[in-house]
């Protein structure tokens, strides 16, 4: 009889730091024929927490591996998740009118192996429907006004449940999610912010930066929480500008760095490389 095909799995975990964690995890995997192909660890002395990400190949049935890890997890008070390496994460992308982040994510998903399955695009304006249609992503126009915000959020959560959405990406979605939505989707919503946080908040960040004569502009990808723009940061990057750059050039450069930062954050989240450490994140790139 032919042996069962090997599965390539990824384990991400966190727990209070103490001796023996790596030995226990690697031992449980080895007992089930696991061959570790990648392993990263970090102990945070400021929080006393330990973080680990492991990729392993094994022919053991998944439920047996999960059972062994559950025993280790109980012993070490772990929060852990086991998944298949490269499995596309069911993702809902939200946008408004600006297209650069949406186009970039859809392009990377189709042509560059970004491990997400875009089950839909939600927008509060109809402008981006042709882009979603071009990439074969179902488009949902959900207008938002002060009077309809609760109805709009109910429609959003209905889509999340209907399509078993695992990740929501705010790709320049220019609406604030309510506290209740942030709580229900905690740890599964990524936003791209048009600067370092906190800095130049408001509707015209690049104009403000231009007025102040900044020499670096940047972008921040972070998890969304009820505290506006205060969620745990996943990734940041900068672009150098000079006195000769006008506002239009700064906008163009800013959009370029926004899409890069958001794409990296989405990829790392989908690959289970981001673990929450209180108000911060541990990222194993």
Image (cartoon, grey):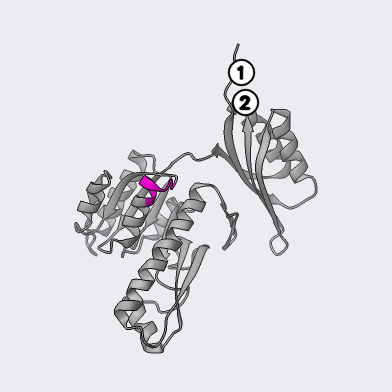
Residue at point 30%, 58% (across, down): 95
Range of residues picked out in magenta: 108-114
Pick the quarter of the image with the N terminus.
Answer: top right
Residue 3 marker: 1
Q: Give the residue at mark 2.
A: 59
Pick the quarter of the image with the C terminus.
Answer: bottom right
Dividing the picture into quadrants, the one containing residue 143 is bottom left
Residue 199 marker: none
Does the magenta-highlighted stretch encompass residue 135? no
> What separation in Å lies between label 1 and label 2 (alpha carbons)?
8 Å
CB under 8 Å between callouts 1 and 2?
yes
Q: Nearer the viewer, residue 72 or 241?
A: 241
Q: How many marks?
A: 2
Secondary structure at numbered mark 1: loop
Residue at point 69%, 28% (across, down): 33
Percent position (x, y) of residue 96? 27, 61
On the rendered structure, is 66 left or right of 88? Answer: right
Is 3 situated above or below 212? Answer: above
Percent position (x, y) of residue 254? 38, 72
> Of callouts 1 and 2, which one flags the residue occurring earlier in the amino acid sequence?
1
Percent position (x, y) of residue 116? 41, 45
Q: Is residue 51 at all visible to an observer of this figure?
A: yes
Secondary structure at numbered mark 2: loop
Few, some or many residues within 10 Å of mark 2 (<14, 14–19, 20+): some
């Amino acid at each position: 009889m032919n042996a069962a095909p090997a599965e390539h799995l990824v384990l991400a975990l966190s727990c209070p730091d103490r001796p023996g964690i790596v030995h226990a995890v690697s031992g449980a995997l080895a007992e089930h024929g696991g061959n570790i192909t990648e392993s990263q660890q970090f102990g945070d002395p400021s929080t006393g927490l330990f973080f680990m990400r492991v990729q392993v190949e094994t022919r053991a049935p998944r439920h047996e591996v999960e059972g062994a890890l559950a025993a280790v997890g109980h012993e070490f008070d772990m929060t852990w998740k086991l998944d298949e390496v490269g499995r596309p994460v069911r993702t809902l992308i939200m946008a408004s009118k600006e297209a650069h982040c949406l186009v970039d994510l859809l392009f990377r998903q189709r042509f560059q192996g970004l491990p997400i399955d875009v089950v839909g695009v939600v927008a509060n304006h109809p402008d981006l429907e042709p882009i979603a249609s071009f990439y074969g992503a179902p488009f949902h126009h959900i207008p938002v006004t002060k009077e309809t915000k609760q109805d709009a959020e109910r429609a959003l959560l209905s889509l999340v449940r209907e399509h078993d959405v695992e990740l929501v990406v705010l790709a320049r979605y220019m609406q604030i999610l309510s506290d209740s939505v942030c709580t229900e989707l905690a740890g599964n919503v990524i936003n791209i912010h048009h600067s370092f946080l906190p800095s130049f908040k408001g509707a015209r960040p690049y104009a403000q930066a231009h007025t102040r004569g900044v020499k670096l502009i940047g972008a921040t990808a972070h998890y969304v929480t009820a505290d506006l723009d205060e969620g745990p940061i996943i990734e940041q990057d900068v672009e150098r500008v000079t006195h000769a750059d006008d506002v239009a050039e700064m906008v163009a450069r800013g959009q370029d760095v926004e899409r890069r930062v958001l794409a990296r954050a989405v990829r790392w989240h989908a690959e289970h490389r981001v673990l929450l450490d209180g108000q911060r994140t541990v990222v194993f790139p």
